[in-house]
Amino acid sequence: MINKILIANRGEIAVRIIRACREMHIASVAVYSESDRDSLHVRLADEAVCIGPPQPGRSYLNISNVISAALVKGADAVHPGYGFLSENDKFAEMCAANGLVFIGPPAEAMRLMGNKVQARETMLASGVPVVPGSQGVISDAGQALQIAAEIGYPVLIKASSGGGGKGMRVAQYEEEVVRGILTARSEATAAFGSGDIYMEKYVEEPRHIEIQLLADNYGNIVHLGERDCSIQRRNQKIIEESPSTAVDEELRRRLGDAAVMAARAVGYRSAGTVEFLLDKHDNFYFIEMNTRIQVEHPVTEMITGIDLVKEQIRIAAGEELGYRQQDIRFSGWAIECRINAEDPERNFMPCPGKIIEFQPPGGPGVRLDSAIFAGWEVPSHYDSMLGKLIVWGKDRDEAVVRMQRALDELNVTGVKTIIPFHRRILNNAFFRRGEIYTNFIQRRIMPQG
């Protein structure tokens, strides 16, 4: 039995997990940095403990402090949320070593899928389609140029570790390969502590399609359909939807089968997401597997009625999935807009500051996952995302109109947000027709940007 969970995170995802705990009659423990002392997740949790100063490396990324907090508060388990320590295999091992249940996959699965080169090789061996590219880490520019010539331009240079678009460069010709390697390696080293890079064929105008999985400890794995995460800025998702306008029932089955195959190949359990690139001809290629709950998980919850955080907790507690693939049903359409404290007119510069007014939207089919409130000070030390606005409609047209209405109702003053930018996207004729791809913003919204 899991009776008390420490949430090793902050912001909206910490609030999301605390709410799931409350409904499951499980006590919750919040951790917080000194700058988060008055945050909503601290207020909502049953208990809270300070784990350090504002800098993430001294608080939310400090494994010793997080483990100590869990032990002092008598927690049975730790939920890492997303970001911070959520895909840190050493943290998962430290939890186990201290008698704490890590609410996530086995450390070995995290290790395999956390290194993109190893993940790619594992998928190749298991028969999951991958984008043509290098076999292993690239050692120097000469090797990179040879591989690029073999697979054809354009190519994508990527960091082996990490994500979020960091350590990633597109090269159209030889000179850009040489420059891209230096830049990607430097950026990856600074962001992830590893300068290892690899190369893939750049799939032009693809869709970013991901498959949500749930896997228990008894070999049962189900997929919960796809999410289309093609609306991205600088390789970071800002709008997600489910289902995708590009995926029919047969393609969904093929994508789901490949994702389940990927999970079996690494002995996966818990909630996880397998990400693919989908080209214009319905060919799809494995990109990576995210071994945690995703930011965009609510759109899957909205169309399936399955609470993914509760399922994570049940799986970690040793329960078997209560359904099989044939039991999964999809209803309607869901869209999520990430609400970031950024100024679209100033190259999306982060905008920390005090929230003066906050009026959330409401009405049928509207959900806001957020941790903000009037008077709260948005800190400068963390990601700029304030929350996620999610809507459900009986079909895509209704979902789009409902999102437009909800964005109009959502009022946040005191800091700049990307709400006006979302309105531009939803009003775009190509978006309304579902004609989207990963460079949609560059081509359709900010062609000069």
Image: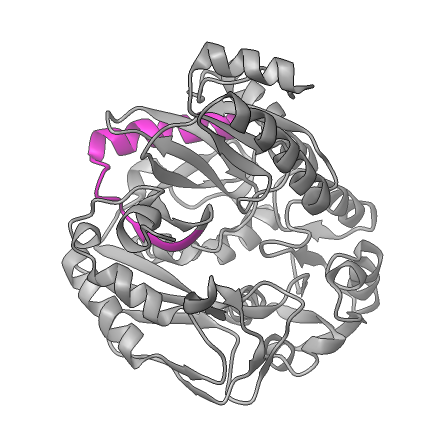
Residue occupying image coordinates x 50% and y 57%:
310
The residue that appears at 28% across and 57% down in the rendered structure is 334
Q: Residue at x 58, y 15 (%)?
A: 135
- Left or right: residue 40 versus residue 150 is right
Residue 197, position as x, y percentages in the image: 63, 28
Coloring basis for residues: one colour
**Quarter that holds the N terminus:** bottom right
Nearer to me, 386 or 233: 233
Q: Quadrant of residue 336?
A: bottom left
Which residue is most to the front?
175
Q: Is residue 196 visible?
A: yes
The residue lying at 71 percent from left, 33 percent from top is 195
**Residue 88 visible to an observer of this rendering:** no
Q: Nearer the viewer, residue 144 or 353?
A: 144
Q: Is residue 437 magenta?
A: no
The answer to whether 61 is drawn above or below residue 268 in the figure is below
Please name whichever residue, 10 or 195, is drawn nearer the observer in this view of the structure.
195
Q: Position of residue 327 (x, y in %)?
A: 30, 42
Residue 61 lies in what quarter of the image? bottom right
Q: Position of residue 184 (x, y in %)?
A: 62, 36
Q: Which residues are magenta?
A: 237-265
Total marks shown come to: 0
Residue 49 point in image, percent of width and height: 76, 74
Residue 260 counted in the magenta span = yes
Residue 393 in the image: above or below residue 54: above
Q: Is residue 398 left or right of residue 198?
A: left
